[in-house]
Every structure is written in C-alpha cells, then in structure tokens.
Amino acid sequence: MKRKSGTGINSKENLWGWAFIALGTFLIGLFVFYPMVQSFIMSLQTGKGNNLTFGGLDNYIRMASDATLLKAIGNTFIYLLVQVPIMIVLALIISSVLNDKKLKFSGFFRTAIFLPCVTGLVAYSIIMKSIFASDGLVNKLLMAIHAISVPIEWVTHPFWAKILIIIAITWRWTGYNMIFYLSGLQNIDNSIYEAAEIDGASPFKKFTAITVPLLKPIILFTTVTSTIGTLQLFDEVVNITNGGPANATTTISHYIYNLSFRYTPDFGYATAVAYLIVVMIIILAVIQFKVGGDKND
Amino acid sequence: MTKKINLALKYLFLTVISLVSIFPFFWMIISSTNKSVDITRGKLLPGSNFMENLNNLLSSNLGFVNSLGNSAKIAIIATLLALLVSSIAGYGFEIFRTPARDRVFNILLLSMMVPFSALMIPLFKFFAKLNSTPFKFMGLNTIVAIVLPSVCTAFLIFLFRQNTKAFPKEILEAARIDGLGEIAIFFKIFVPTMKTTYAAAAIITFMGNWNNFMWPLIALQSPEKRTVPLIISTLGSSYTPDYGLIMIAIVIATIPTAFVFFVMQKHFVAGMTGSIK
C-alpha cells in the first residue's frame, strides 16, 4: 500500500477532501461560529432595540448587580448539583441491575425505562404539570398514604416548584443515560464479575469496584452532556412554571429569552448573559475532564 | 436463599422504575378521554369525553391540523438535508484524512458546546434582515429559517465519521481503479452500505426537529406558521388550560416518534449511543 494512514494523500484527493467537507463546514461556520462572534460584539454594546452604542464591559459589570440573573444562576446550579448526580447514579444502578444475564424480561424493562425519551420536551412538561396539579393525582396519592395532610402547591411554591422541575427532568432523561451505560457494560467481560463473586464480593462492592471504574469514560461523557443540557434548560421551565413563582424556577437561558423577546429587547445585555453560559460550560467541562478524564486521553 | 431474595428485590426495583416510566403515557391516553376538571382531580379511569375533546381541538381556531403539516414539513426537509450534508462531510473527514482537516474537524466539534441561547439573537437578526431583501422566502416566519440552522450539526458529522471508520477502504481503491469518480463512489457505494447509520441519524434528526421548541418560538410569529410544540405550549400556558384537549394534542404529537421508536428501536439506540463508540 502506497497510502500511509493520514498524511499520504495525493493533491487530487486532497482537493476532493476539501470539496466533501466544504458545505458542512460552511454551514456550521455560518450558523454557529459567525453568530458567536456577532454575539460577542453585541455583548459590548448597550441600548434598547436596535439603538445600540458601544459600551465596553458595561453589560458584564451590570450582571454582578442584577438580582434576577443571580437568582437564575442560583436556580440553574441547584438543578445542576441536585438533578445531574441523582439521575446519573440512578441510571448507573438501573443499568447494572439490568445487565444481569439471569434476569428475565430485561428487554421489556429496558424498553419501558427508555420510553420517556420518545416524548417531546413541551409535551412531557405539560403532562407533568397536570399530574402535579394542586388537587391532582400525586397530591391525592400522598394524602391517601398520609405522607402529607394538605396538598403541596407544586407549581406555585418556590421550593416545591424546583423539586417538580427536578422530578420532571429526571423522569425524562434517566433512561436516556441508562442506554449509554448499558452499551458500555456490554463491553465489560462477564468473567470479571464472576471472579469477584468467587472472591465473595458483595453486589455493592462489585458496583463500586468494577462497574463504576470501567464505565468512567462514559460516565464522564454523560456528565458533560447533562451539564451542558442543564445550563441550557429552557423548555421545561417555560412550560411547567414559566419561571415562576417570582423567578423561583427561572434559568439563565429563560432569562436570556425574556431579556430579548419578552421585555423591551435588550440584545446587548442578553448576549453578555449568553456569554456567561459559554464561559460556565467551558469551565465546568474542563473541571470534569480534569477530575474524571484519563491522563492519556 | 439470599440469592433468591436478591433477585426478587431486583425485579421489584425494575418493576417500580418501569411503572413510573410508563405511567405518564398511560396518563395521557386516559386523560384524553376525560374532562379537564377530572384530569386535574387525578381521575385514573377512562371517561367518555374523547370525541368532545377531539372536536374541541379540531374546531378551535388554533389551527392544530395546520401545525401538524408545518411540523411534518420542517422535520422531513431538515432530516433529508441534514443526512445529505452531514454524511458528505463525515465521509470527507474520514476518507480524505489529513492533519489540516483533522484540525478543522476538532474546531467543528467545539460547536457542540455552544449553547443555543448564545446564537439565537444574532440568528434572529440575520433572518429578520432577510425579510427586507429578495431572500424574503428564507426570512423569519418561513420554514427555511427554521430548517437552515439545524441542517448541519457537528454531532451528525461526528456520527457519520465514526461509522465511516468501519467502512472497508479497499472497496474505494477498487472502485477508483475501475474508473468511478469520487461523487459516484460516495452515492453508489458508500450510501447503500451505510443504511443503518443513515437510519440512526434520521431518527435522531427527525425527533429533534419534530420536538424543537426554542427556535420556532422565536422565529415563527404568525399563527398559521406555528408548529405542534408551539400550539401545545400555548394551550398549556393559558390560565385555565383545557387538559382534555391538550392531552389529545400530545397523544397525536407523540405518535410519530413513538412509531419510529417501536419500529426501529435498534437504530434509535444506535443513533443515541453512536457518538461514544
């Protein structure tokens, strides 16, 4: 073979290579990177509507004293720090239980648990809202088992509204993450588990000493994607609580939307807030790769 | 004995989780036959209000049927274009691999970390500007404006590139010796052998576009252009939502994706996990 992997490519093939990737690269450039640059320029401008003037870092300074933004950041981090770990641990447990070869009906269980992924985000949000209505099903159930004596105001109480959002997201995405772990578990040789069993390892020990370390790259991947997803949380918040009560459930993305398209358009400030998300995603991804990544990656 | 208890506990755990996962589906179907008041009171039995809910949905001035058409058009056009553009690019990056193109590829991957909220304002302004030019047909309020930004994603290019790695390169050499051009090789040899990858990519793209909410919410302003998620969201956000009617709308909106899921579950899963191979 004349061609070496990678570099040994003649000039005609090289031209074809550029031709093949041209359109895709151009479109991503036009609809992602070009708007990113424009966003950054806009974030240095102040003013309402289309009357924008250069304002330097004014927008970025303004963020520090914006109570609604600070609340939105706080909410987003509550979702991130509570929901993502719960979902990932739950998905890991489910997938390791399902991975048992002796288990019957595992195909049925897998399909059932994965099913929430077929719902649209708007659709499941409204389903959740109806189930958690103040005299609705969940409250009736909780009252029937005497867990509560008065109905919980899921949608209008600042604390419970956050819990509702967390429950909803967990319902929608746990099965999604489980599928990643299941496909990772299939690559783990069953003899490792059998050897551990002979050594008398408990199921918990097998989980923490074999499953979790071997799935580490996939756990890292799902943590990073879930983090990015949570930082962009929008559909659920709009459709379950619309950010309320009194911004108790609003997120950064929701706030950017309101700044741009609900209140008098303040594109300069809105894009500055959007850049805050970009910076957060970069910082969190770097931290997660440092904590969870392999050195030789 | 402890083994048996262990197994029983496993079944119990999985049954509970499965029931919780399935319940909202059961709920939306039951609820579509009930009156709104009964739904918010947690009625768990089927009622007799199905036809009335359906009539209310179809006869309301929301244009639900029209929105089904809009969503279908957007999802189908976006999926076809996305498959074409992304597979060509993914193929190019893998088959004609050079360090320079690898660098381009790595830069494209960075776009996966960019939140849509950082793009929506410039995109909104970009498409708004087109409305006052001869390119009005692709300005705000058009299907083109909804489709274009989602035609090419780094995720899809990545998915196609990963799956191209398993494509036998010797076939390409043989085809070249036979005098087949590069474009013919792609369409006549590559595309037919990659059917499963195309299926997986089609499912994930169709679902994403069918359910897309944020960008249509911003870019589609006239009522007759609205998509299904926009209608459902509008119905759900009214002060006294008519849940009976909403549930039918949700059931109808879920049918295409549920159908795709049950018919092509394997490809469905392959599309989601394809990125970690």
Image (tube, coloured by chain):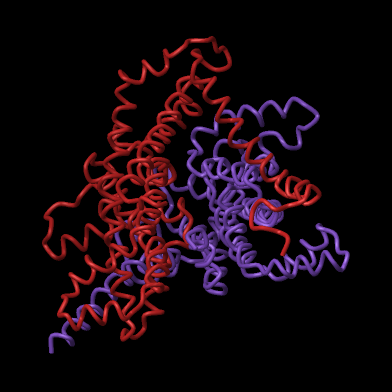
Chain colours: A red, B purple
In the displayed structure, would residue A166 be above or below residue A211? above
> Does A16 sit left or right of A68 as displayed?
right
In the displayed structure, would residue A27 be above or below residue B253? above
Residue B132, image x, y percentages? 74, 25
Q: Quadrant of residue B158?
A: bottom right
**Residue farthest to the right, as pictured:** B179
In the displayed structure, would residue B69 be above or below residue B225? below
Residue A250, image x, y percentages? 34, 36
> Does B84 sit left or right of A44 as displayed?
right
In the displayed structure, would residue A263 be above or below residue B276? above
In-front residue for pair B226/A71: A71
Q: Quadrant of residue B45?
A: bottom left
Q: Is residue A255 visible?
A: yes
Name the residue: 67% across, 39% down.
B145
Residue A212, image x, y percentages? 28, 63
In-front residue for pair A285/B124: A285
> Does B196 sit left or right of B40 as displayed?
right
**Residue farthest to the bottom, as pictured:** B1
Disc tally is 0
Residue B67, image x, y percentages? 62, 51
Name the residue: 33% across, 44% down.
A290
Q: Is residue B79 visible?
A: no
